[in-house]
Image: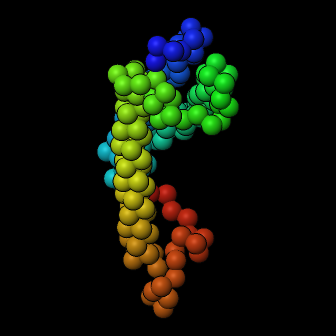
Amino acid sequence: MSGLTEGAKRQRGRLVAVVRDEIAAHERLDALLAKQEASVARPSSDAFREATLAIEAELARAPHRTQKRESALKAIGAELGVAGAALTLTSLAERFGGGDALRDERDRLQSIALQTQARTRKVAALVRVHREVTRELLQSALGDEDEPRGDVLSGGTLIDAEV
């Protein structure tokens, strides 16, 4: 780590800030997913709708964070004489040695990303189950007895009810 130029050290600090921003984004997304998960039983509720809109807004900011990360990697790559596209947080953490803030932040990012991924899958599964239960309830209530396997929702039946 002592062999780094001042420019490389400065770019490393910039990259650490970018990674911290990404960690914060994952933490916000995970909190929003938890809110959405808690409201899945009533998807027509304001809480579900608000969580969904907030998640969409958070995801809309992802391309900007990606651009910032790619720019930081390109800049640090230029300082190190390596193509930015060839660099990863792991490879940079190894270059900078043990005890580096980048290594710690990389580990935090990996942890929160895995947590967010697991919660995303859980919420998606809950929504699928809720949708199927709703479909079966509507089928039982509105279905044609002669065609018990017909799908009420695809048949054009319009209802206005909260489930």
Q: Which residue lies at the image location 51% right of the left edge and 15% below the top edge?
A: 3
Q: Which residue lies at the image location 37% right of the left edge and 47% below the top edge?
A: 119
Relative to 150, say whether 4 is above or below. above
Q: Quadrant of residue 74?
A: top right
Q: Nearer the viewer, residue 84 or 28?
A: 84
Relative image position of residue 139 (x, y in whole percent): 44, 75
Q: Which residue lies at the image location 39% right of the left edge and 59% below the top edge?
A: 125
Relative image position of residue 107 (x, y in whole percent): 37, 33
**Image quadrant in which the C terminus is located:** bottom left
Residue farthest along the front direction in this orientation: 3
Q: Which residue lies at the image location 39% right of the left edge and 44% below the top edge?
A: 114
Question: Looking at the image, can residue 3 be seen?
Answer: yes
Relative image position of residue 135 (x, y in whole percent): 44, 69
Q: Quadrant of residue 51?
A: top left
Relative to 85, say whether 117 is above or below. below
Relative to 11, say whether 32 is above or below. below
Relative image position of residue 48 (x, y in whole percent): 42, 43
Q: Nearer the viewer, residue 61 or 91?
A: 91
Q: Nearer the viewer, residue 163 or 59?
A: 59
Residue farthest along the bottom direction in this orientation: 146
Query: In screen coordinates, is 9 left or right of 40?
Result: right
